[in-house]
Amino acid sequence: MNAPLPTSLHFDIRGLTAAMAHSHACDALRCQFSTQQWEMLASYMQPFALQQGQSLIEQGVADQTLYFIEIGTLSVHYLDEKGRIRMAMVAAGSVVGEGAFFSHQPRSASVQAANACKLWCLTALRFKELANRNSPIALELTLALGAVLAKRMSNRPKRVAVT
């Protein structure tokens, strides 16, 4: 899943916050965090990179990891029972994985990198730890994720992106 990181690749939470602040996507993640709160959240997340074509999520797999997109675009593919494929693109400044993160259900679609990506992941276990130690941050993140989920569910082409 994770690509080896080039030595020149640098991760800083400010890159992710800038991506979210500058995203014009309807499903961008909008958190009202201070710099200190973003830094606290970053301490619970793991940054990594994907190269074009690498898989991030497989449809049907039980996993509750949430992925924040700093750079790049992810392609989401849903294969229905009739063998039809539906697709959505999710760009920098947004997230994928919120469906399983909240529902505890297997992944509803597959996700792969459409181009080189910088991502941050937050596992359900680390989120629970965050909620126990810093509940205002966890609550704000939950509300922002709920807004992303609502926007995607109300937009038929973006429903596929709920993974």
Image (cartoon, helix red, strand yellow):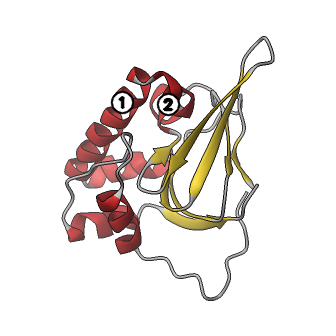
Relative side of 58 to 161, left or right:
right
Mark pair 2, 1: CA separation: 8 Å
Whether residues under marks 2 and 1 lie with C-beta atoms below 8 angstroms apart, the answer is yes
Residue 35, image x and y in percent?
22, 70
What type is the residue that disc 1 sits on?
Lys
Residue 105 at x, y = what percent? Answer: 58, 25
The relative height of residue 84 versus residue 27 in the rendered view (above or below) is: above
Label 2, secondary structure: give it: helix
Residue 3 bears which disc, if any? none
Q: Is residue 37 left or right of residue 107?
A: left
Q: Please give the residue where the numbered disc 2 appears in the rendered image.
A: 158
Q: Residue at x 26, y 51 (%)?
A: 31
Pointer 1 residue = 151
* Residue in view at x 22 percent, y 70 percent: 36
Residue 62 spot, x, y in % from top left: 66, 33
In terms of sequence position, does the residue under pointer 2 or pointer 1 come before the other?
1
Residue found at the very far right of the displayed protein: 83
